[in-house]
Image (tube, rainbow, N blue to C red):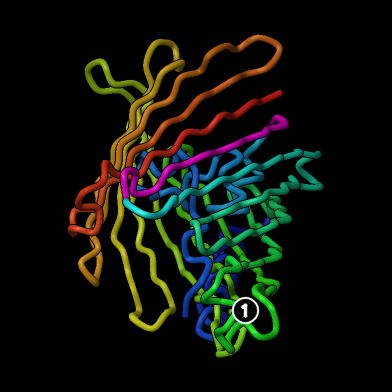
Amino acid sequence: MEPLFLRNKYIFGIILLLLLASQLEAAFEGLYMGARPIGMGSAFVSVSDDSNAILWNPAGLSQLKKIEIVTLYSKLYWNIQDDNLNKNFAGFVLPFDKNIGTLGVGWANSSSSLYCENVFLFSFGRIIFEGFSFGFNAKAMLKTYAVNDYTLIDPVFVNGNLAFGISFDFGMLYKITRDLSIGITVDNINRPDIHLQDTDKVCAVIKGGCSLSLGSLLFFKNILASAELDYYKNLSQDYKFIGGLESWFFDKTFAVRTGGGIGNNSFMEIDAGMSWIVFKTACLLQIDYAFRYSLNGSMEGTIGSHFISTTVKF
């Protein structure tokens, strides 16, 4: 077993590398989806203990012990006029021996009637030493614009209506104790320029957070609290302070969640969610739901955004 000071030195070195590399505006910012994480206010970088880790922190894949398949559908800004905004995700996780690691593959889609983003992910997470995990994503990113009377005559689309690029994410997860974890990710570390005509770099995103298992309080069981700071390397240098809570009931078959966040550019939102484990026989089937509502007026006239996902564990 390595001395503690050597482990801390390795951790510090990796954190420093991630933070420096991220300094190297802004399609594909809406890639973070998943009903369970969103129900917790999206403060999930230090949790990432299910197949949602593909999108939120690939280092968390090292915590998975079973094969998992996850699917998600969402309806954004429900009741908005003249458009149909939604996000979809499908992921598959295959754990190997802890000395090898865990593989994940995924597809994420964000679309409207005029524009579509598709991301294909290859993920890997592995325990480096006890309590500390490292992971990465390789992403093929494709954006497509609808063909209509406007795009047919606009010179921006003279060479086509789609653009493609490759991006990489890195993440770490450190379980300080059984109940306390910290996580850091740097997404789109290479900032690919995915454009039709003018420069359109995908922004790097730095996320850092911690989570704490609080035990039980009254009829709330298995309480998990998380907090996080997210920074977007875009034109407006966006940042968000977010946090959330999760609690399970009835022999861990039903869960409720709440969360929210504040940030610059009038960012302010509230989130809520729930889960139901339908059965735990030869496999486990879990259904998750989340609701998101912005308090800055951008969702006025809508009934918020809604997310529903299913997870199967073998």
Q: Does residue 298 sit above or below 9 in this rendering?
A: above
- On screen, residue 216 versus residue 49, left or right, reads left
Q: Does residue 298 sit above or below 275 in this rendering?
A: below
Could you say which is closer to the camera, residue 88 or residue 256? 88
Q: Does residue 160 sit above or below 34 in this rendering?
A: below
Q: Position of residue 281 (x, y in %)?
A: 65, 9
Q: Does residue 107 sit above or below 310 in this rendering?
A: below
Residue 1 can be seen in this image: no
Q: Amino acid at mark 1?
A: Ile
Q: Position of residue 263 (x, y in %)?
A: 25, 65
Disc 1 target residue = 194
Residue at image location 66% in from the left, 45% down from the top: 62
Residue 28 can be seen in this image: yes
Quarter containing the C terminus: top right
Residue at image location 24% in from the left, 71% down from the top: 264
Q: Callout 1: helix, strand or loop?
A: loop
Residue at image location 53% in from the left, 56% down from the top: 111
Residue at image location 31% in from the left, 44% down from the top: 79
The residue stretch that appears in magenta: 65-80
